[in-house]
Image: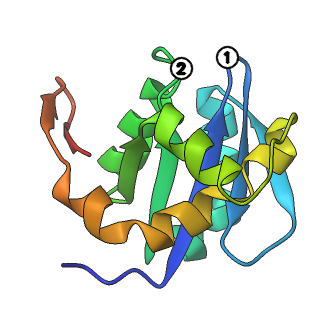
Amino acid sequence: MTLYQNFIGIDIGKFTFVTNVHGQKLTNTFDNTMQGLKAFIRKHKQDLSDSLTVLETTGGYEFLALKILLAKGYAVHRANTRKVKNFIRSFGNDFKTDALDTRPWPSMAKNALISLTSTSFLLKNKNCSMTW
């Protein structure tokens, strides 16, 4: 099993996505576009190289982020949104904003690493293979 030095959470929306790095209070918001993903990668290039990035299923809005991050060789897991929300609620939090909602994502990834790495499947794309 790969040991990750860090964990990054991404809360994906139709037009934007919010990110948080484990242990940091600061969140960042990016456009859910190619330019927004490039800005995210530039800002977190050092973090991404040894991190597991976790994002939620959002009816396909996560696909561009998955495609780009995996094509660049970063570790990414697409988590079941219901499970993540239940994890967040288990701490007594019922967040209402993406900026607050995304902060527990990296902790969930760290605490659930074994179950995250045991669930994977392969998706073939014309440009890359994706495993999550």
Q: Residue at x 42, y 36 (%)?
A: 80
- Nearest the viewer among 44 and 113 is 113
**Callout 2 crowding tier (Cα within 10 Å): few <14, some 14–19, many ≥20:** some
Q: Is residue 41 visible?
A: no
**Is 107 left or right of 69, judged from the image as shown?**
right
Relative to residue 128, is residue 79 drawn left or right?
right
Cα gap from disc 1 to disc 2, whole angstroms: 6 Å
Q: Which residue is mark 1?
A: 14
Do labels 1 and 2 touch, CB within 8 Å?
A: yes
Residue 116 vertical placement versus 16 (above, below): below
Q: Quadrant of residue 113?
A: bottom left
- At horizontal 73% and vertical 19% (from top left) the residue drawn is 15
- Amino acid type shown at disc 2: Tyr
Q: Is residue 30 left or right of residue 53?
A: right
Residue on which disc 2 sits: 61
Looking at the rendered structure, the secondary structure element under dot 2 is loop
For the N terminus, the image quarter is bottom left
For mark 1, give the secondary structure.
loop
Residue 41, image x and y in percent? 59, 55
Residue 72 image offset from top left, x and y in percent = 36, 53
**Residue 24, percent from left and from top:** 79, 74
First in residue order: circle 1 vs circle 2: 1
Q: Nearer the viewer, residue 122 or 49?
A: 122
Q: In the rendered view, would you say 81 is above or below 109? A: above
Disc 1: CA contacts within 10 A as few (<14), some (14-19) or many (>=20): few
Where, by quadrant of the figure, is residue 108 drawn?
Answer: bottom right
Q: Is residue 84 visible?
A: yes
Badge number at residue 63: none
Amino acid carrying label 1: it is Lys
